[in-house]
């Protein structure tokens, strides 16, 4: 019974993200370069992670670290520390005190420290940042103050009790940009200022066309990221993306990447997720009215599960 439920989680999570986009290529984890196709520019106006939502998470998670990352099961709103190594929540749940890693640097060379986290969270009143709206005045997780202790201690005080305080600092609202970018957000219009596992290779990137990420050799968790290079290709239409996928020019579409990312955040280790025609398992090369099937394989602990879901 447990195995059946776990297998269904793999397929349903995959289908949710894939059907949203309608297309999928074939993920290839054997090479050191991962090429992802998308039908929309993941950073159309800037590289500010707070300006976007979970839909752009696979793109921004390559460039930025979060304070916490989500764990399985999703309903429990569990987390584990990322930039945070330990934390305590007050008995009244109106504050959380976090200790940061002391060995993390941003792409601009500056340190990830308590003052930087405070500078980020102090932007919560900025109405142009949808991911921070919940932290602003009148928000569901309104923050009243942020204080620091030493170089790596941060305390966040809320107006009301927050039973899931750590979870509020995951995803887009958990990303941290460098202090320079927090103080001058205009910097993010031309470049990312993150501490993530990859950095933008500006010389080989073309805005709204191709984004090339290089592995960050100094990242604190680099062993968790298998690719040396990640390339995001932006297509003008879904058909153009589908054609590229069918021609083998893509390893994975943004939809697949989002589906696999959703599984990772719930404690899975996905091998592949792809959408195919049911009758011959051929790739979907455009809008398709015929029956489809989502194929997925993922590990949960030492157990590897393979499943399919007709859609």
Image (cartoon, rainbow, N blue to C red):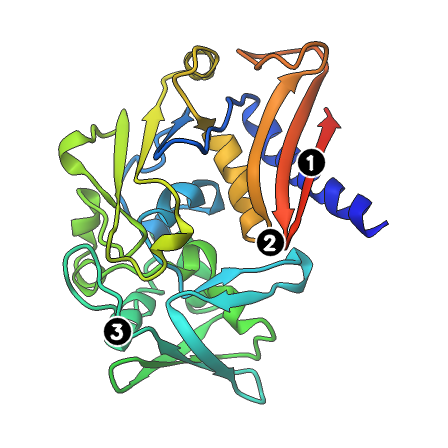
Question: How many marks are shown on the rendered structure?
Answer: 3
Quarter-wise, where is residue 218 in the image?
bottom left
97 displayed left or right of 214? right
Marking on residue 306: 1
Q: What element does badge 1 sit on? A: strand
Q: Residue 265, relative to residue 121: is it above or below?
A: above
Q: Residue furthest right?
A: 1
249 displayed left or right of 256? left
Is the C-beta separation of discs 3 and 1 under 8 Å? no
Residue 215 percent coordinates (x, y)? 27, 45
| Residue matched to label 3 | 113
159 displayed left or right of 210? right
- C-alpha gap between disc 3 and disc 2: 28 Å
- Depth-wise, is mark 3 or mark 1 nearer the camera? 1
| Residue matched to label 2 | 266
| Disc nearer the start of the sequence (3/1) | 3
2 displayed left or right of 22? right
Query: In the image, what residue occupies the spot 38% across and 31% down?
Result: 31
Q: What element does badge 3 sit on? A: loop
Q: What element does badge 2 sit on? A: loop
- C-alpha gap between disc 3 and disc 1: 42 Å
Give the class, few, some or many, for how many residues have Cα within 10 Å of label 3's Cα (few <14, many ≥20): many
Q: Between 66 and 43, which is closer to the camera in this rendering?
A: 66
Query: In the image, what residue occupies the spot 61% across and 75% down?
Result: 163
Quarter-wise, where is residue 177 in the image?
bottom left
């Amino acid at each position: 019974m447990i195995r059946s439920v776990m297998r269904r989680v793999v397929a349903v999570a995959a289908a949710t993200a894939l059907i949203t986009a309608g297309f999928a290529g074939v993920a290839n984890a054997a090479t050191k370069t991962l090429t992802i196709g998308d039908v929309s520019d993941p950073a159309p106006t800037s590289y500010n992670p707070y300006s976007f939502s979970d839909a752009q998470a696979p793109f921004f998670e390559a460039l930025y670290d979060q304070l916490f990352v989500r764990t399985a099961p999703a309903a429990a709103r569990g987390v584990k520390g990322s930039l945070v190594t330990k934390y305590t929540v007050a008995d009244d749940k109106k504050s959380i005190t976090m200790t940061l890693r002391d060995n993390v640097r941003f792409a601009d060379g500056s340190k990830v420290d308590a003052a930087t986290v405070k500078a980020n969270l102090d932007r919560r009143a900025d109405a142009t940042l949808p991911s921070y709206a919940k932290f602003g005045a009148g928000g569901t997780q309104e923050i009243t103050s942020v204080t620091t202790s030493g170089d790596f201690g941060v305390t966040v005080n809320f107006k009301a009790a927050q039973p899931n305080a750590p979870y509020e600092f995951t995803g887009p609202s958990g990303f941290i940009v460098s202090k320079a970018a927090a103080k001058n957000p205009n910097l993010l219009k031309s470049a990312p200022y993150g501490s993530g596992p990859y950095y933008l290779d500006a010389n080989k990137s073309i805005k709204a066309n191709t984004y090339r990420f290089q592995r960050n050799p100094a990242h604190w968790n680099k062993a968790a990221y298998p690719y040396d290079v990640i390339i995001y290709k932006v297509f003008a239409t879904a058909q153009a993306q589908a054609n590229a996928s069918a021609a083998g020019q893509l390893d994975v579409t943004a939809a697949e990447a989002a589906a696999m990312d959703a599984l990772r955040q719930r404690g899975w280790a996905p091998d592949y997720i792809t959408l195919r025609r049911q009758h011959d398992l051929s790739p979907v090369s455009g809008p398709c009215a015929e029956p489809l099937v989502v194929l997925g394989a993922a590990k949960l602990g030492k157990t590897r599960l393979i499943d399919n879901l007709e859609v």
